[in-house]
Amino acid sequence: MTDEKKQIHELTPMDDETNQAFETNEVESLPERDALSHDESSDEEIIASSFNEGDETPEQMRARWAKEKADAHKVSEERKKEGLAERGPALEKLNAAKKKLSMAKANRRKAKTESEIASAEEAVAKADAELLLAEDDMRSVKNKLELSRIKFKKELADNRTILSLRHMRMYFKLGRWPDYVKLKAVHDVSFDIQEGETFGIVGESGCGKSTLGKTILRLTNPTSGQVIYNGQDIASIPDKDFVKLRPELQMIFQDPMSSLNPRMSVKEQIEEPLLIYKRCPDRAEREKRVLELMDTVGLARRYAEMYPHELDGGRRQRIGIARGLSLEPKLIVCDEPVSALDVLIQAQILNLLMDLQREKGLTYMFITHDLSVVKHISNNIAVMYLGQIVEQCETKRLFSHTLHPYTKALLSAIPVPSLQKKRERILLKGELTSPINPQNRCRFAPRCIYASEECFASAPELKDVGNGHKVACHRVAELNDLSET
Protein backbone atom coordinates (compact mmCIF):
# COMPACT_ATOMS: atom_id res chain seq x y z
CA MET A 1 0.00 0.00 0.00
CA THR A 2 1.42 3.39 -0.99
CA ASP A 3 1.82 6.31 1.38
CA GLU A 4 -0.91 8.21 -0.48
CA LYS A 5 -3.43 5.46 0.24
CA LYS A 6 -2.48 5.49 3.90
CA GLN A 7 -3.54 9.12 4.27
CA ILE A 8 -7.08 9.50 5.54
CA HIS A 9 -8.54 12.96 5.82
CA GLU A 10 -10.24 13.93 9.05
CA LEU A 11 -14.03 13.52 9.15
CA THR A 12 -14.05 10.98 6.32
CA PRO A 13 -17.47 9.28 6.12
CA MET A 14 -17.23 5.53 6.64
CA ASP A 15 -18.97 4.37 3.47
CA ASP A 16 -18.70 0.90 1.99
CA GLU A 17 -15.78 1.80 -0.30
CA THR A 18 -13.76 3.17 2.62
CA ASN A 19 -14.49 0.08 4.70
CA GLN A 20 -13.39 -2.14 1.83
CA ALA A 21 -10.15 -0.20 1.51
CA PHE A 22 -9.34 -0.90 5.14
CA GLU A 23 -10.25 -4.58 4.99
CA THR A 24 -6.87 -5.58 3.52
CA ASN A 25 -4.37 -8.06 4.82
CA GLU A 26 -2.05 -5.27 5.86
CA VAL A 27 -4.67 -3.70 8.13
CA GLU A 28 -5.90 -7.00 9.52
CA SER A 29 -2.38 -7.95 10.58
CA LEU A 30 -2.12 -4.97 12.92
CA PRO A 31 -2.58 -5.64 16.65
CA GLU A 32 -5.78 -4.34 18.31
CA ARG A 33 -5.23 -0.89 19.79
CA ASP A 34 -6.40 0.29 23.20
CA ALA A 35 -8.05 3.32 21.59
CA LEU A 36 -10.48 0.98 19.80
CA SER A 37 -11.15 -1.34 22.73
CA HIS A 38 -14.54 0.25 23.45
CA ASP A 39 -15.75 -0.37 19.91
CA GLU A 40 -17.91 -3.43 20.45
CA SER A 41 -18.79 -4.17 16.81
CA SER A 42 -16.90 -4.40 13.57
CA ASP A 43 -18.05 -2.71 10.38
CA GLU A 44 -19.39 -6.06 9.10
CA GLU A 45 -21.43 -6.55 12.28
CA ILE A 46 -22.76 -2.99 12.03
CA ILE A 47 -24.02 -3.53 8.50
CA ALA A 48 -25.44 -6.96 9.33
CA SER A 49 -27.28 -5.61 12.38
CA SER A 50 -29.05 -3.01 10.23
CA PHE A 51 -31.45 -5.69 9.01
CA ASN A 52 -33.08 -7.02 12.17
CA GLU A 53 -35.38 -10.00 11.96
CA GLY A 54 -38.99 -8.89 11.79
CA ASP A 55 -38.30 -5.53 10.15
CA GLU A 56 -40.48 -4.73 7.14
CA THR A 57 -38.47 -4.93 3.93
CA PRO A 58 -38.83 -2.30 1.17
CA GLU A 59 -40.63 -4.89 -1.01
CA GLN A 60 -43.13 -5.65 1.75
CA MET A 61 -43.61 -1.93 2.38
CA ARG A 62 -44.28 -1.26 -1.31
CA ALA A 63 -46.78 -4.12 -1.42
CA ARG A 64 -48.54 -2.82 1.69
CA TRP A 65 -48.70 0.70 0.27
CA ALA A 66 -50.07 -0.60 -3.06
CA LYS A 67 -52.84 -2.40 -1.17
CA GLU A 68 -53.54 0.70 0.94
CA LYS A 69 -53.71 2.81 -2.23
CA ALA A 70 -56.16 0.38 -3.86
CA ASP A 71 -58.31 0.29 -0.73
CA ALA A 72 -58.23 4.08 -0.49
CA HIS A 73 -59.30 4.39 -4.15
CA LYS A 74 -62.20 2.01 -3.51
CA VAL A 75 -63.31 3.98 -0.44
CA SER A 76 -62.91 7.23 -2.40
CA GLU A 77 -65.19 5.97 -5.19
CA GLU A 78 -67.80 4.86 -2.64
CA ARG A 79 -67.71 8.25 -0.90
CA LYS A 80 -68.00 9.99 -4.28
CA LYS A 81 -71.18 8.02 -5.06
CA GLU A 82 -72.57 8.82 -1.61
CA GLY A 83 -71.78 12.50 -2.15
CA LEU A 84 -73.53 12.55 -5.54
CA ALA A 85 -76.56 10.80 -4.03
CA GLU A 86 -76.74 13.39 -1.26
CA ARG A 87 -76.06 16.31 -3.57
CA GLY A 88 -78.67 15.25 -6.17
CA PRO A 89 -81.89 16.10 -4.26
CA ALA A 90 -80.49 19.44 -3.11
CA LEU A 91 -79.52 20.31 -6.69
CA GLU A 92 -82.96 19.36 -8.01
CA LYS A 93 -84.61 21.50 -5.33
CA LEU A 94 -82.36 24.44 -6.25
CA ASN A 95 -83.09 24.15 -9.98
CA ALA A 96 -86.84 23.90 -9.31
CA ALA A 97 -86.72 27.03 -7.14
CA LYS A 98 -84.85 28.94 -9.85
CA LYS A 99 -87.39 27.84 -12.48
CA LYS A 100 -90.30 28.84 -10.25
CA LEU A 101 -88.76 32.29 -9.60
CA SER A 102 -88.16 32.79 -13.32
CA MET A 103 -91.81 31.95 -14.13
CA ALA A 104 -93.08 34.25 -11.34
CA LYS A 105 -91.03 37.15 -12.73
CA ALA A 106 -92.37 36.47 -16.24
CA ASN A 107 -95.99 36.52 -14.93
CA ARG A 108 -95.28 39.78 -13.13
CA ARG A 109 -94.18 41.38 -16.40
CA LYS A 110 -97.40 40.23 -18.05
CA ALA A 111 -99.66 41.49 -15.24
CA LYS A 112 -101.82 44.53 -16.13
CA THR A 113 -104.38 45.12 -13.41
CA GLU A 114 -103.50 46.04 -9.85
CA SER A 115 -104.80 42.74 -8.49
CA GLU A 116 -102.72 40.76 -11.03
CA ILE A 117 -99.63 42.81 -10.21
CA ALA A 118 -100.14 42.30 -6.45
CA SER A 119 -100.62 38.56 -6.92
CA ALA A 120 -97.55 38.36 -9.15
CA GLU A 121 -95.42 40.29 -6.60
CA GLU A 122 -96.54 37.90 -3.88
CA ALA A 123 -95.61 34.89 -6.07
CA VAL A 124 -92.17 36.40 -6.81
CA ALA A 125 -91.48 37.01 -3.10
CA LYS A 126 -92.53 33.45 -2.25
CA ALA A 127 -90.38 31.99 -5.04
CA ASP A 128 -87.44 34.15 -3.96
CA ALA A 129 -87.73 32.87 -0.37
CA GLU A 130 -87.84 29.26 -1.62
CA LEU A 131 -84.73 29.91 -3.70
CA LEU A 132 -82.87 31.24 -0.65
CA LEU A 133 -83.79 28.12 1.31
CA ALA A 134 -82.69 25.88 -1.57
CA GLU A 135 -79.37 27.75 -1.81
CA ASP A 136 -78.82 27.34 1.95
CA ASP A 137 -79.52 23.60 1.68
CA MET A 138 -77.10 23.32 -1.25
CA ARG A 139 -74.45 25.25 0.63
CA SER A 140 -74.83 22.97 3.66
CA VAL A 141 -74.45 19.87 1.48
CA LYS A 142 -71.33 21.30 -0.17
CA ASN A 143 -69.79 22.17 3.21
CA LYS A 144 -70.56 18.70 4.51
CA LEU A 145 -68.98 17.06 1.46
CA GLU A 146 -65.92 19.32 1.72
CA LEU A 147 -65.45 18.46 5.40
CA SER A 148 -65.80 14.79 4.52
CA ARG A 149 -63.20 15.17 1.75
CA ILE A 150 -60.75 16.92 4.09
CA LYS A 151 -61.28 14.27 6.76
CA PHE A 152 -60.74 11.48 4.23
CA LYS A 153 -57.59 13.16 2.94
CA LYS A 154 -56.28 13.46 6.50
CA GLU A 155 -57.06 9.78 7.14
CA LEU A 156 -55.07 8.84 4.07
CA ALA A 157 -52.14 11.02 5.18
CA ASP A 158 -52.24 9.53 8.68
CA ASN A 159 -51.87 6.05 7.20
CA ARG A 160 -49.23 7.00 4.62
CA THR A 161 -45.61 6.72 5.70
CA ILE A 162 -43.46 8.79 3.36
CA LEU A 163 -40.08 8.23 5.07
CA SER A 164 -38.81 5.42 7.29
CA LEU A 165 -35.40 5.16 8.92
CA ARG A 166 -34.24 1.73 10.05
CA HIS A 167 -31.16 1.42 12.29
CA MET A 168 -29.34 4.24 10.52
CA ARG A 169 -25.76 4.92 11.54
CA MET A 170 -23.39 7.67 10.46
CA TYR A 171 -19.80 7.25 11.65
CA PHE A 172 -16.76 9.32 10.78
CA LYS A 173 -13.12 8.32 10.90
CA LEU A 174 -10.87 10.75 12.72
CA GLY A 175 -7.11 10.89 12.41
CA ARG A 176 -4.70 9.11 10.11
CA TRP A 177 -4.29 5.45 9.31
CA PRO A 178 -3.67 3.26 11.28
CA ASP A 179 -4.48 5.39 14.33
CA TYR A 180 -7.97 6.45 13.24
CA VAL A 181 -10.91 6.34 15.65
CA LYS A 182 -14.66 6.32 15.03
CA LEU A 183 -16.85 9.29 15.84
CA LYS A 184 -20.40 7.94 16.10
CA ALA A 185 -22.40 11.02 15.09
CA VAL A 186 -25.66 9.10 14.51
CA HIS A 187 -26.13 5.65 16.05
CA ASP A 188 -29.01 3.23 15.44
CA VAL A 189 -31.76 5.77 14.67
CA SER A 190 -35.18 4.52 13.54
CA PHE A 191 -38.45 6.41 13.05
CA ASP A 192 -41.31 6.97 10.58
CA ILE A 193 -42.60 10.24 9.12
CA GLN A 194 -46.20 10.36 7.88
CA GLU A 195 -47.10 12.24 4.73
CA GLY A 196 -48.28 15.81 5.35
CA GLU A 197 -46.98 16.03 8.93
CA THR A 198 -44.09 17.89 10.57
CA PHE A 199 -41.64 15.66 12.42
CA GLY A 200 -39.48 17.62 14.86
CA ILE A 201 -35.92 16.67 15.85
CA VAL A 202 -34.67 18.48 18.98
CA GLY A 203 -31.54 18.32 21.08
CA GLU A 204 -28.60 20.39 22.20
CA SER A 205 -25.80 21.46 19.84
CA GLY A 206 -23.58 18.60 18.71
CA CYS A 207 -26.13 15.81 19.23
CA GLY A 208 -26.21 14.87 15.53
CA LYS A 209 -29.41 16.58 14.35
CA SER A 210 -27.95 18.25 11.26
CA THR A 211 -25.85 15.18 10.41
CA LEU A 212 -29.04 13.11 10.52
CA GLY A 213 -30.81 15.48 8.10
CA LYS A 214 -27.87 15.60 5.68
CA THR A 215 -27.50 11.82 5.76
CA ILE A 216 -31.19 11.31 4.91
CA LEU A 217 -30.71 13.47 1.81
CA ARG A 218 -27.41 11.74 1.04
CA LEU A 219 -25.33 14.86 1.33
CA THR A 220 -23.21 12.35 3.27
CA ASN A 221 -23.68 8.63 2.70
CA PRO A 222 -24.71 6.63 5.79
CA THR A 223 -22.39 4.04 7.25
CA SER A 224 -25.24 1.52 7.45
CA GLY A 225 -28.99 1.25 7.80
CA GLN A 226 -31.96 1.97 5.57
CA VAL A 227 -33.54 5.25 4.47
CA ILE A 228 -36.82 4.15 2.89
CA TYR A 229 -38.59 6.86 0.89
CA ASN A 230 -41.93 5.83 -0.65
CA GLY A 231 -40.95 2.16 -0.35
CA GLN A 232 -37.49 2.57 -1.89
CA ASP A 233 -34.24 2.34 0.06
CA ILE A 234 -32.53 5.52 -1.18
CA ALA A 235 -29.45 4.88 0.96
CA SER A 236 -28.34 2.01 -1.26
CA ILE A 237 -29.38 3.06 -4.77
CA PRO A 238 -26.75 4.34 -7.25
CA ASP A 239 -26.18 8.10 -7.54
CA LYS A 240 -27.61 8.19 -11.07
CA ASP A 241 -30.92 6.82 -9.75
CA PHE A 242 -30.95 9.06 -6.70
CA VAL A 243 -30.56 12.17 -8.87
CA LYS A 244 -34.04 11.46 -10.26
CA LEU A 245 -35.46 11.60 -6.72
CA ARG A 246 -33.55 14.71 -5.69
CA PRO A 247 -36.33 17.15 -6.75
CA GLU A 248 -38.72 15.45 -4.29
CA LEU A 249 -36.27 15.80 -1.37
CA GLN A 250 -35.10 19.31 -0.56
CA MET A 251 -33.45 21.13 2.33
CA ILE A 252 -33.64 24.57 3.93
CA PHE A 253 -30.31 25.36 5.57
CA GLN A 254 -29.63 27.05 8.87
CA ASP A 255 -27.53 29.97 7.62
CA PRO A 256 -29.05 31.45 4.45
CA MET A 257 -26.01 33.62 3.75
CA SER A 258 -23.61 30.68 3.55
CA SER A 259 -26.05 28.57 1.51
CA LEU A 260 -26.61 31.26 -1.15
CA ASN A 261 -24.20 32.24 -3.91
CA PRO A 262 -23.06 35.83 -3.23
CA ARG A 263 -22.40 36.38 -6.97
CA MET A 264 -25.95 35.52 -8.04
CA SER A 265 -29.01 37.74 -7.84
CA VAL A 266 -32.23 36.65 -6.12
CA LYS A 267 -33.80 35.74 -9.46
CA GLU A 268 -30.77 33.69 -10.49
CA GLN A 269 -30.69 31.85 -7.14
CA ILE A 270 -34.32 30.71 -7.48
CA GLU A 271 -33.93 30.02 -11.20
CA GLU A 272 -30.88 27.74 -10.81
CA PRO A 273 -32.72 24.50 -9.82
CA LEU A 274 -35.13 25.00 -12.74
CA LEU A 275 -32.19 25.23 -15.13
CA ILE A 276 -30.38 22.20 -13.70
CA TYR A 277 -33.44 19.94 -13.91
CA LYS A 278 -34.74 21.56 -17.12
CA ARG A 279 -38.18 22.20 -15.64
CA CYS A 280 -38.88 25.38 -17.62
CA PRO A 281 -36.92 25.37 -20.91
CA ASP A 282 -38.57 28.57 -22.12
CA ARG A 283 -37.01 31.70 -20.64
CA ALA A 284 -40.26 33.62 -20.35
CA GLU A 285 -41.92 30.67 -18.64
CA ARG A 286 -38.96 30.35 -16.29
CA GLU A 287 -39.06 34.01 -15.30
CA LYS A 288 -42.79 33.75 -14.69
CA ARG A 289 -42.19 30.73 -12.44
CA VAL A 290 -39.52 32.62 -10.47
CA LEU A 291 -41.87 35.55 -9.87
CA GLU A 292 -44.62 33.15 -8.78
CA LEU A 293 -42.25 31.56 -6.25
CA MET A 294 -41.28 34.99 -4.91
CA ASP A 295 -44.96 35.81 -4.45
CA THR A 296 -45.54 32.45 -2.73
CA VAL A 297 -42.85 33.05 -0.09
CA GLY A 298 -43.77 36.72 0.40
CA LEU A 299 -40.69 38.18 -1.28
CA ALA A 300 -41.44 41.43 -3.15
CA ARG A 301 -40.66 41.32 -6.87
CA ARG A 302 -38.53 44.45 -6.61
CA TYR A 303 -35.81 42.32 -4.93
CA ALA A 304 -35.41 40.08 -8.01
CA GLU A 305 -32.21 41.79 -9.22
CA MET A 306 -30.69 42.32 -5.77
CA TYR A 307 -27.92 40.22 -4.18
CA PRO A 308 -27.93 38.34 -0.85
CA HIS A 309 -25.70 40.85 0.96
CA GLU A 310 -28.24 43.58 0.22
CA LEU A 311 -31.04 41.79 2.08
CA ASP A 312 -31.74 41.04 5.73
CA GLY A 313 -31.76 37.54 7.24
CA GLY A 314 -35.50 37.00 6.91
CA ARG A 315 -35.55 37.78 3.19
CA ARG A 316 -32.47 35.61 2.60
CA GLN A 317 -34.24 32.71 4.27
CA ARG A 318 -37.27 33.29 2.04
CA ILE A 319 -34.93 32.87 -0.95
CA GLY A 320 -33.84 29.51 0.47
CA ILE A 321 -37.47 28.47 0.91
CA ALA A 322 -38.30 29.56 -2.67
CA ARG A 323 -35.35 27.50 -3.97
CA GLY A 324 -36.60 24.51 -1.99
CA LEU A 325 -40.11 24.87 -3.43
CA SER A 326 -39.00 25.45 -7.02
CA LEU A 327 -38.93 21.73 -7.92
CA GLU A 328 -42.23 20.98 -6.12
CA PRO A 329 -40.79 18.64 -3.47
CA LYS A 330 -42.72 16.24 -1.24
CA LEU A 331 -40.31 16.20 1.72
CA ILE A 332 -38.30 19.16 3.02
CA VAL A 333 -35.64 18.90 5.72
CA CYS A 334 -35.61 22.20 7.61
CA ASP A 335 -32.23 22.48 9.37
CA GLU A 336 -32.83 25.14 12.05
CA PRO A 337 -34.28 27.60 9.49
CA VAL A 338 -35.19 30.23 12.11
CA SER A 339 -32.36 29.96 14.66
CA ALA A 340 -30.39 32.86 13.13
CA LEU A 341 -33.43 35.18 12.95
CA ASP A 342 -35.00 37.53 15.49
CA VAL A 343 -38.27 36.60 17.18
CA LEU A 344 -40.57 38.60 14.87
CA ILE A 345 -38.99 37.21 11.69
CA GLN A 346 -39.03 33.71 13.24
CA ALA A 347 -42.81 33.92 13.62
CA GLN A 348 -43.21 35.09 10.00
CA ILE A 349 -41.08 32.24 8.61
CA LEU A 350 -42.82 29.61 10.76
CA ASN A 351 -46.28 30.82 9.70
CA LEU A 352 -45.12 30.82 6.08
CA LEU A 353 -43.91 27.21 6.34
CA MET A 354 -47.20 26.14 7.95
CA ASP A 355 -49.26 27.93 5.28
CA LEU A 356 -47.23 26.27 2.51
CA GLN A 357 -47.72 22.89 4.15
CA ARG A 358 -51.50 23.33 4.19
CA GLU A 359 -51.63 24.58 0.60
CA LYS A 360 -49.22 22.09 -1.00
CA GLY A 361 -49.42 19.08 1.32
CA LEU A 362 -45.71 19.24 2.17
CA THR A 363 -43.98 17.00 4.70
CA TYR A 364 -41.35 18.58 6.97
CA MET A 365 -38.56 17.17 9.06
CA PHE A 366 -37.92 20.16 11.31
CA ILE A 367 -34.54 20.28 13.09
CA THR A 368 -34.11 22.74 15.95
CA HIS A 369 -32.76 23.19 19.47
CA ASP A 370 -35.65 25.49 20.43
CA LEU A 371 -38.45 23.51 22.08
CA SER A 372 -40.86 26.45 21.88
CA VAL A 373 -40.47 26.55 18.10
CA VAL A 374 -40.88 22.81 17.62
CA LYS A 375 -43.98 22.80 19.85
CA HIS A 376 -45.57 25.42 17.59
CA ILE A 377 -44.99 23.63 14.28
CA SER A 378 -44.54 19.86 14.87
CA ASN A 379 -47.00 16.96 15.03
CA ASN A 380 -44.46 14.51 16.45
CA ILE A 381 -41.11 15.07 18.17
CA ALA A 382 -37.98 12.98 18.63
CA VAL A 383 -35.43 14.10 21.25
CA MET A 384 -31.79 13.30 20.41
CA TYR A 385 -28.82 12.99 22.73
CA LEU A 386 -25.32 12.27 21.40
CA GLY A 387 -26.49 10.65 18.18
CA GLN A 388 -29.36 8.58 19.64
CA ILE A 389 -33.09 9.16 20.07
CA VAL A 390 -33.97 9.04 23.77
CA GLU A 391 -37.68 9.96 23.57
CA GLN A 392 -40.26 10.12 20.79
CA CYS A 393 -44.02 10.76 20.77
CA GLU A 394 -46.72 13.23 19.74
CA THR A 395 -45.99 16.87 20.49
CA LYS A 396 -48.82 17.39 23.01
CA ARG A 397 -47.92 14.23 24.88
CA LEU A 398 -44.23 15.14 25.08
CA PHE A 399 -45.00 18.41 26.84
CA SER A 400 -47.70 16.97 29.10
CA HIS A 401 -46.19 13.54 29.92
CA THR A 402 -42.43 13.93 29.74
CA LEU A 403 -40.73 10.67 30.73
CA HIS A 404 -36.98 10.78 29.99
CA PRO A 405 -34.74 12.65 32.49
CA TYR A 406 -32.91 14.46 29.67
CA THR A 407 -36.16 15.71 28.11
CA LYS A 408 -37.33 16.91 31.51
CA ALA A 409 -34.11 18.91 31.88
CA LEU A 410 -34.61 20.46 28.42
CA LEU A 411 -38.19 21.49 29.18
CA SER A 412 -37.17 23.00 32.52
CA ALA A 413 -34.91 25.42 30.64
CA ILE A 414 -37.85 27.02 28.75
CA PRO A 415 -38.57 30.48 30.26
CA VAL A 416 -42.03 31.00 31.75
CA PRO A 417 -43.58 34.39 30.81
CA SER A 418 -45.05 34.96 34.27
CA LEU A 419 -43.85 36.61 37.49
CA GLN A 420 -46.11 34.48 39.69
CA LYS A 421 -45.43 31.08 38.13
CA LYS A 422 -41.93 29.67 38.44
CA ARG A 423 -40.55 26.48 36.94
CA GLU A 424 -38.04 24.38 38.85
CA ARG A 425 -34.87 24.29 36.78
CA ILE A 426 -33.10 20.92 36.43
CA LEU A 427 -29.37 21.55 36.16
CA LEU A 428 -27.36 18.82 34.49
CA LYS A 429 -24.00 18.04 36.06
CA GLY A 430 -21.16 15.77 35.10
CA GLU A 431 -19.16 15.34 31.93
CA LEU A 432 -20.52 14.73 28.45
CA THR A 433 -19.91 11.26 27.06
CA SER A 434 -17.50 11.39 24.14
CA PRO A 435 -19.03 10.33 20.82
CA ILE A 436 -15.64 8.87 19.86
CA ASN A 437 -15.79 5.10 20.46
CA PRO A 438 -18.39 5.39 23.25
CA GLN A 439 -18.84 2.50 25.67
CA ASN A 440 -21.86 0.22 25.53
CA ARG A 441 -23.90 2.05 28.15
CA CYS A 442 -26.51 4.79 28.44
CA ARG A 443 -24.86 7.87 26.99
CA PHE A 444 -26.76 10.15 29.35
CA ALA A 445 -25.80 8.15 32.47
CA PRO A 446 -22.80 10.34 33.55
CA ARG A 447 -25.11 13.38 33.76
CA CYS A 448 -28.25 11.64 35.05
CA ILE A 449 -29.09 11.92 38.77
CA TYR A 450 -31.16 8.73 38.51
CA ALA A 451 -28.45 6.57 36.91
CA SER A 452 -28.03 3.06 38.34
CA GLU A 453 -25.49 0.30 37.81
CA GLU A 454 -27.60 -1.05 34.95
CA CYS A 455 -27.32 2.30 33.15
CA PHE A 456 -23.52 2.02 33.15
CA ALA A 457 -23.57 -1.67 32.22
CA SER A 458 -25.73 -1.65 29.07
CA ALA A 459 -27.34 0.75 26.60
CA PRO A 460 -31.17 1.01 26.84
CA GLU A 461 -33.34 0.31 23.82
CA LEU A 462 -35.96 2.73 22.52
CA LYS A 463 -39.19 1.02 23.61
CA ASP A 464 -42.88 1.90 23.37
CA VAL A 465 -44.25 2.44 26.89
CA GLY A 466 -47.81 3.05 25.69
CA ASN A 467 -49.80 5.35 23.37
CA GLY A 468 -46.95 5.42 20.86
CA HIS A 469 -44.64 7.03 23.44
CA LYS A 470 -41.12 5.65 22.99
CA VAL A 471 -38.38 6.10 25.59
CA ALA A 472 -34.80 4.82 25.89
CA CYS A 473 -34.32 4.51 29.66
CA HIS A 474 -33.82 1.50 31.94
CA ARG A 475 -35.73 3.13 34.82
CA VAL A 476 -38.52 4.89 32.91
CA ALA A 477 -41.32 2.79 34.45
CA GLU A 478 -39.92 3.15 37.96
CA LEU A 479 -39.28 6.93 37.78
CA ASN A 480 -42.65 7.80 36.23
CA ASP A 481 -44.81 5.21 37.98
CA LEU A 482 -46.18 4.01 34.63
CA SER A 483 -47.93 1.04 36.20
CA GLU A 484 -50.60 3.39 37.58
CA THR A 485 -51.10 5.50 34.44
Image (cartoon, rainbow, N blue to C red):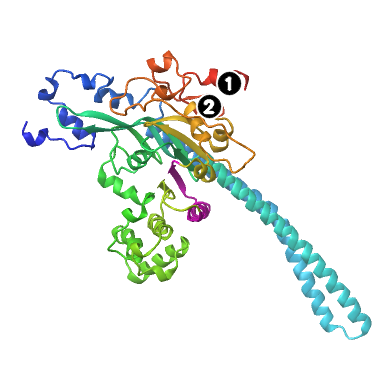
Badge 1 marks a residue whose secondary structure is helix
Question: What is the chief secondary structure element of the magenta stretch?
Answer: helix
Residue shown at the point (33%, 69%) measured from the top left: 282
List x then y, in percent, for residue 15: 24, 34
Residue 295 drawn in magenta: no
Q: Amino acid at mark 1?
A: Leu
Magenta residue span = 344-369
The label on residue 403 is 2
Q: Is residue 44 above or below residue 100?
A: above
Q: Is residue 118 above or below residue 350?
A: below
Q: Is residue 203 left or right of residue 136?
A: left
Q: Is residue 185 left or right of residue 336?
A: left
Q: Is residue 145 left or right of residue 62?
A: right
Q: Amino acid at mark 2?
A: Leu
Q: Nearer the viewer, residue 472 or 287?
A: 472
Pick whichever of labels 1 and 2 is earlier in the sequence.
2
| Circle 1 residue | 482
Residue shown at the point (62%, 47%) measured from the top left: 79
Badge 2 marks a residue whose secondary structure is loop
Residue shown at the point (64%, 50%) measured from the top left: 147
Q: Closer to the observer: label 1 or label 2?
A: 2
Residue 279 in sight here? no
